Structure formats: structure tokens, C-alpha cells
Image (spheres, helix red, strand yellow):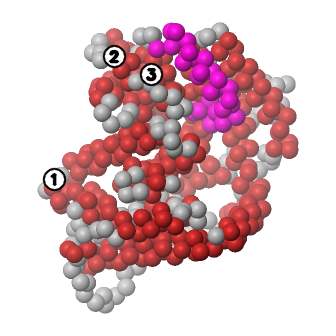
């Protein structure tokens, strides 16, 4: 678990930069934290510059958070329902999986590298790659063993190759990207999209990818005014805002399904599989919520019986750390002390929003410390986030770290980015946060049950 909890962990740094309630997000995971890991966390969280803190004056009036009442009342939750069940759609789901699996097998047999890469990428974007782990892995092995695997100069193909291999933990050098300045490449929007996305899987020291990211970002921005294809225009706009590598998989699945539905060249079986799979995955928490709660309670009780001392210690220690972190922020607030960015990051496990007049956040801390504008501070913080992602990518490539831990770390960083991308996604439950949650748990994708591929 060191990838998630040690002080030098890149995912830890990233989440602190983007999330002010990181500890609460970790609550489901904390029950599994080892005693020694928790001890390290304790020493780290207390390693802030408390010596600079001035003792607070007596507060005459308690400050209120002024959060609005929750919108997730029992009536709203009970109103969520779905007719999509695995019992009703199992046969259709299996039929679609077989069709898609055959398409991947055909591409592998023909040694069609470009088709293999595109299909694997589509499966991931549409949220169905988990159904085909073995098939995709086998296809990638075939691709890697091919003598022509890395000799192409096709920008889209070489970018996809780099992206897919890194995502599946297969070593590949960034040297395959040539340093180019040809203006002809600026007209290859699909290639630019793939290269820009691939550049976000870079690691520290891979300067060629950083150059590609910067240069191709300019090309993509310039292309916005020239694109007539609405689908392509939307993909460019979204990618410039947030690379796919940073997005939450299920939210991205819904987003890309909507885009792929308007693609005239779409694989209909793959599209239908993605739509059905999304609805079935969405139905699971609606249909089995109560049984899951009972199961989780049973598992928690079992863990406590097996090792009650470690479980209790982990809970108590995390709450102790949480309270100490709040106390430090309260002292900063009452003494009107603006911490340095380093001090803020060391303590920024949890905090409140600026609208409440609380302690300054990372951007404000950096502005005060360096005497720079808000725009410059934002730029520097973004640079720290990008570097943290490079470190995450570097650690993700280590064979010694289980894939399950790698994915957990990646998804924690993605979750933090998603929740706080448009402001406070924890303290409020309206706007983008509400729309995303309802689309994830309550609104199935409309499907014409009388007209599908397997009929």
C-alpha cells in the first residue's frame, strides 16, 4: 500500500493538490491499512511547521459551514429504478461479447496492428475492456512480437501503440516518437489527438513527450476553428480540458458512448455491447444495494474478528490525524497566518472552502509565498499536478507493484480530479456533481430492444 500512503507517493501528492477531503475519500480503504503503514502516515501528517503557528484567540462565535441540505433524500433514492437485470439480458450480453471477441481475434490473425490498437482503445474508452482482458493481452503480445510493430511513421498508429502498451504495463521507449516540426502533421487531427493523449503517459525525464504535448496542444487549439465534424470537435475540446488518462472510467464510458453513437464508422456490435453493459453495471447498485451493505458489514465483522487490534488502531489513528489536521488549519485561520505551499500540502488532508473565509488554499498560499499573480500560481500548481502524474506513471510501470494496487492508485487520483474539477464536489450536491451522479446511477442509456445486432 506504499504507493497510496507514503509521503513521497505521487498519487498522494496529486490528490492533496486537487482534493481538500482526501481522507474521507479513503475511508473504505482505511480498514485494510496495515499497522506499520498507519504509523508512517501519523508521523507524516504531523511533520508540518507547527512551530510557526501563533496560539489562537478565543472564538466568540462558532463559524458555520452553511452547507445546503442534502438533496439525496429517501424519496429521491427510492425513485431510482431499472428494468435492466443480468437475468433478463445475460443471453444478449454473451452474444455481443462473442461477436466483439471474434473481431479482435480476426485483427490479431491478420497481424493488422492498426486495427488491434484501435479496437483495444475503443474497448477501453467504451468501458468494456474488462470483458476481454485475456483476448486484448494476447493481441498485444502478437503485436509486440511483430517485426513491424514499432517501425511505422503513421502518427496515429505509433501514438496508440505507445499508449496501449504503457497502459498494459509493457515496456516501450518514448524514443519511437520523432521530433517533428512538419506543418503537414497539423492537418492530421486524429493523429494529433492520439499523440497528445499518449504524451500524458510520460514519465519524468521523457522530454520528447513533454515537447510533443506542448507543440501538439497548440496545433489542436488552432484546429478548433477549422473543424466541421462536430464529433471530432467535441473530442478535441474535451481532450484539451482533461486527457482521457485522467478521467474516471465509468464517466468516460458514458461520455464516449454518446460520441461513438454519432460515428458513422462505428462497430455496431461493440456499441451495443457498451450500451447494454453500461445499463447492467448501473443496475447493480440499484438492485443489490441492501444485500451489498449486509455483505460489507459481514466482511468488516470478519476482518475485525481476525485482527481486531489492527482494525481498531487504524480507525482511531486516522480520526486522530484528521482532528489534528483540522486543529492546525483552525490555528492558521484565527492567527491570520498564510502557510507556505509546502506547509499547506503537508497538512492539506481536509479543509473547507474559501467562501467560508477559511484558511487559504494552495493557489492563495503560492501567491502569497512567491508574490505572483493568481494566473501564475494556477500555472505552477498545474505543473505540480502534471509532474505528479508522471510519477504515478513511473510507479505504475514497476513490475513489483500488483496491478490491482496500480489501478486503485490511478483511480483515486482520477476521482479527486473529477470531484474537484468544477469546484467543491463534496460540500455541494448540485450542478455538475448532481448531474454526473444521476447519470451514473439512475439514467440508463435508451436501447431499442426490438432491433439489436444479435437478432
Q: Identify the residue at horizontal 47%, vertical 39% (top origin).
A: 398
Question: Is the residue marked by circle 2 packed among few (<14), some (14-19), or many (20+) residues within 10 Å?
Answer: few
Kind of element beneath mark 2: loop
Kind of element beneath mark 3: helix
What percent of the width, then of the height, locates residue 364? 24, 60
Dividing the picture into quadrants, the one containing residue 220 is top left
Q: Main secondary structure of the magenta part?
A: helix
Q: Taking 24 as reference, is 157 above or below it?
A: above
Q: Is residue 1 left or right of residue 42?
A: right
State the residue position of label 3: 159
* Residue placed most toward the observer, 361 or 47: 47
Judged by depth in the image, the label closer to the viewer, 1 or 3, is 3
Q: Identify the residue at horizontal 69%, vertical 48% (top origin).
A: 282
Whether residue 96 is visible, yes or no, is yes
Q: Is residue 349 left or right of residue 406?
A: left
* Lower sequence index among marks 1 and 3: 3
**Residues in magenta, as a range:** 123-150
What whole-number distance in Å separates the C-alpha atoms at marks 1 and 2?
Answer: 36 Å
Dividing the picture into quadrants, the one containing residue 197 is top left
Whether residue 237 is visible, yes or no, is no
Q: Are marks 1 and 3 in contact (CB under 8 Å)?
A: no
* Lower sequence index among marks 2 and 3: 3
Question: Is the residue marked by circle 1 packed among few (<14), some (14-19), or many (20+) residues within 10 Å?
Answer: few
Determine which of the numbered discs, if any, sits on residue 178 in the image.
2
State the residue position of label 1: 372
Amino acid at each position: 500500500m506504499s504507493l497510496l500512503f507514503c509521503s513521497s507517493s505521487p498519487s498522494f501528492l496529486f490528490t492533496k493538490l486537487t482534493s481538500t477531503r482526501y481522507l474521507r475519500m479513503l475511508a473504505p480503504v482505511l480498514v485494510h491499512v496495515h499497522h506499520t503503514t498507519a504509523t508512517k502516515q501519523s508521523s507524516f501528517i504531523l511533520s508540518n511547521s507547527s512551530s510557526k503557528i501563533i496560539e489562537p484567540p478565543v472564538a466568540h462565535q462558532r463559524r458555520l459551514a452553511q452547507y445546503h441540505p442534502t438533496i439525496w433524500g429517501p424519496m429521491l433514492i427510492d425513485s431510482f429504478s431499472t428494468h435492466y437485470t443480468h437475468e433478463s439480458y445475460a443471453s444478449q450480453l454473451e452474444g455481443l461479447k462473442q461477436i466483439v471477441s471474434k473481431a479482435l481475434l480476426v485483427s490479431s490473425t491478420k497481424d493488422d496492428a492498426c486495427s488491434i490498437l484501435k479496437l483495444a482503445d475503443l474497448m477501453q474508452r467504451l468501458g468494456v475492456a474488462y470483458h476481454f482482458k485475456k483476448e486484448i493481452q494476447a493481441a498485444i503480445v502478437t503485436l509486440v512480437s511483430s517485426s513491424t510493430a514499432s517501425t511505422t511513421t503513421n502518427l496515429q498508429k505509433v501514438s496508440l501503440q505507445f499508449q496501449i502498451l504503457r497502459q498494459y504495463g509493457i515496456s516501450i521507449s518514448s524514443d519511437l516518437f520523432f521530433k517533428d516540426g512538419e506543418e503537414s502533421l497539423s492537418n492530421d487531427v486524429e493523429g494529433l489527438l492520439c499523440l497528445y493523449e499518449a504524451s500524458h503517459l510520460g514519465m519524468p525525464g521523457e522530454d520528447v513527450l513533454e515537447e510533443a504535448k506542448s507543440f501538439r496542444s497548440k496545433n489542436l487549439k488552432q484546429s478548433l476553428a477549422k473543424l466541421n465534424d462536430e464529433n471530432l470537435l467535441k473530442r478535441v475540446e474535451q481532450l484539451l480540458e482533461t486527457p482521457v488518462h485522467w478521467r474516471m472510467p465509468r464517466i468516460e464510458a458514458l461520455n464516449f458512448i454518446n460520441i461513438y453513437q454519432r460515428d458513422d464508422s462505428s462497430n455496431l456490435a461493440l456499441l451495443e455491447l457498451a450500451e447494454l453493459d453500461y445499463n447492467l453495471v448501473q443496475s447493480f447498485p440499484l438492485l443489490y444495494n441492501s444485500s451489498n451493505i449486509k455483505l460489507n458489514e459481514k466482511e468488516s465483522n470478519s476482518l475485525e474478528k481476525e485482527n481486531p487490534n489492527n482494525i481498531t488502531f487504524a480507525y482511531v489513528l486516522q480520526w486522530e490525524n484528521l482532528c489534528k489536521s483540522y486543529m492546525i488549519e483552525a490555528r492558521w485561520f484565527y492567527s491570520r497566518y498564510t502557510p507556505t505551499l509546502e506547509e499547506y500540502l503537508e497538512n492539506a488532508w481536509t479543509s473547507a472552502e474559501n467562501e467560508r473565509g477559511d484558511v487559504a488554499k494552495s493557489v492563495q498560499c503560492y501567491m502569497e509565498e512567491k508574490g505572483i499573480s493568481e494566473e501564475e500560481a494556477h500555472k505552477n500548481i498545474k505543473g505540480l499536478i502534471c509532474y505528479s502524474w508522471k510519477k504515478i506513471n513511473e510507479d505504475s510501470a514497476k513490475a513489483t507493484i500488483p496491478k490491482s494496487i496500480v489501478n486503485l492508485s490511478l483511480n483515486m487520483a482520477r476521482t479527486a480530479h473529477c470531484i474537484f474539477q468544477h469546484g467543491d464536489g463534496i460540500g455541494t450536491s448540485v450542478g455538475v456533481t448532481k448531474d454526473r451522479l444521476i447519470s451514473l446511477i439512475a439514467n440508463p442509456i435508451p436501447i431499442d430492444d426490438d432491433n439489436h445486432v444479435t437478432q
